[in-house]
Amino acid sequence: MSEFVRPSVKTAIPGEKSRLIVEKDDNYMITATKVFPIAIKKGKGIVLEDEDGNVFYDFTSGVGVCNTGHCHPKVVKAIKDQAEKLIHFAGTDYYYEPQAVLMERLAKLAPGPNKKRVFFTNSGTESVEAAIKLARYKTKRPQFLAFTGAFHGRTMGSLSLTSSRAVHKEGFQPTMPGVEHVPYAYCYRCPYNLEYPTCNMECVKYIEETVMKKLLSPNDVAAFFCEPIQGEGGYIVPPKEFLPMIKKLCEKYGILYVSDEVQAGFGRTGKFFACENFDVVPDIITCAKGMGSGMPIGCIIIDEKLNYPHKGCHSNTFGGNPVCCEAGNATLDVIEEENLLENAKNIGDFMHEGLKDIQKRHPLVGDVRGIGLMQAIEIVKDPKTKEIDPQSRDQICEEMLKLGLVTLDCGVSSIRFIPPLVITKKEMEVGLEIIEKAVAKVEKN
Ligand SMILES: Cc1ncc(COP(=O)(O)O)c(C=O)c1O
């Protein structure tokens, strides 16, 4: 466990000096979504230090990646040791131990009784592309289902499944044809204006009774892409029956159920895979982000029955390179040895309760939702009308940064909190204090 450090922002505006680094550089493509003008120099556990000597708590985990904390010594050692032995040798073409070991461990961790197989990728979007191709290949069906508000990546196939912000697709159409979107179970703003549980899960009924009868035949659908908790779309936790009902629908019509665990997997929710919170056994799991503690590695884990019939159907050059695989093995070691699943559950529950208390004291906080260390608040103008308030949301994020907490938005009017899973209760108490101070300050204005 790293030594306790408090955030401390010395510059009048965080990033005051590093702003120069950022703004002088005209080499970035403007599309880079730089959230705050801070230039991070180093990180340890949940603590970040910027070029100006400001100290922050990272409540983003580098967008859901550094689940074991920044520069965990075991991960650093594994990377260094492997880099001295073998950096690359085309993992889909040849064998080497770090890859074989990681593959076996992941296959064992995946839920369900059937044997699993693993294919390594370099990112979340590449995992989703691999799942799209495999689903088409195996089912010989042309279409896909995904949810409104979903985020599955930004390459052409995954982009067609993504529907969290129109800007992602603007100017890039047409994307891959054959994708239909259906509403997610966003109970705080039910798309059918109903209330759980008296709604009788209208959101699932609509898919079977309307979409599958009037819009597209389920017999044409290869796969249904599901985020167990909708991430970029607003950290939306569906009611417990939702995903099992979607899985049943998939089984009924021979549709493959893909659990996109790129953001919610690798212990984030207190279970290794987030689908385990809902007792769903997917046909395909897509992973990346938390898998290599910051090294670029992802994978799909598939049911044995979906294996390709012969070599070369799908491949890549860098997938599962030895250094990334050793970072992955060290990540699994740290998760096991430091009981990070338990910590994510305990500190996550503590955070959830803390956020609920803040909600009681501050009407700007309309909703609190999340599982484990995947938590969010939705900011509204009035808790009764639930009118969204993205402007106050952005101001709260800025205030939190000034007080030393780095966070990220999500959805239309929400803020997500995804600190590394190594966070302690004391650090979380400091985080909650900062969140409340920032909310109070914006509320007063
Ligand atoms: C659920 C989900 N799937 C896929 C992706 C795409 O991952 P990447 O940015 O590594 O391509 C993301 C990224 O945020 C994600 O949250």
Image (tube, rainbow, N blue to C red):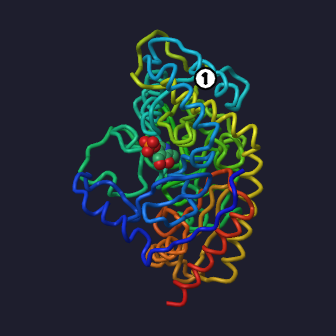
The percent coordinates of residue 67 (x first, y second) are 61, 47
The residue nearer to you, when weighing 354 against 207, is 354
Residue 243, position as x, y percentages in the image = 64, 46
The answer to which image quadrant residue 202 occupies is bottom right
Asked if residue 156 shows in the view, the reply is: yes
Q: Is residue 211 visible?
A: no
Tag 1's secondary structure?
A: helix
* Residue that label 1 marks: 103
Residue 310 in the image: state x and y as whole percent: 46, 9
- Count of numbered marks: 1
Q: Residue at x 31, y 60 (%)?
A: 21
- Above-or-below relation of 141 to 213: above
Is residue 290 left or right of 1 when viewed as pictured?
Answer: left
| x 40%, y 30%: residue | 142
Q: Which residue is outermost to the bottom?
A: 444
Identity of the residue drawn at 70% across and 45% down = 278
Q: Is residue 12 above or below residue 136?
A: below
- At label 1, the amino acid type is Met
Nearest the viewer among 397 and 166 is 397
Would you place residue 393 above or below residue 444 in this image? above
- Using the image as rendered, state which of residue 203 and residue 231 is in the foreground: 231
Name the image quarter holding residue 304.
Answer: top right
Front position in the image: 77 or 340: 77
* Residue 105 on image: x %, y %: 67, 25
Instruction: Tell whether 157 sits left or right of 235.
Output: left
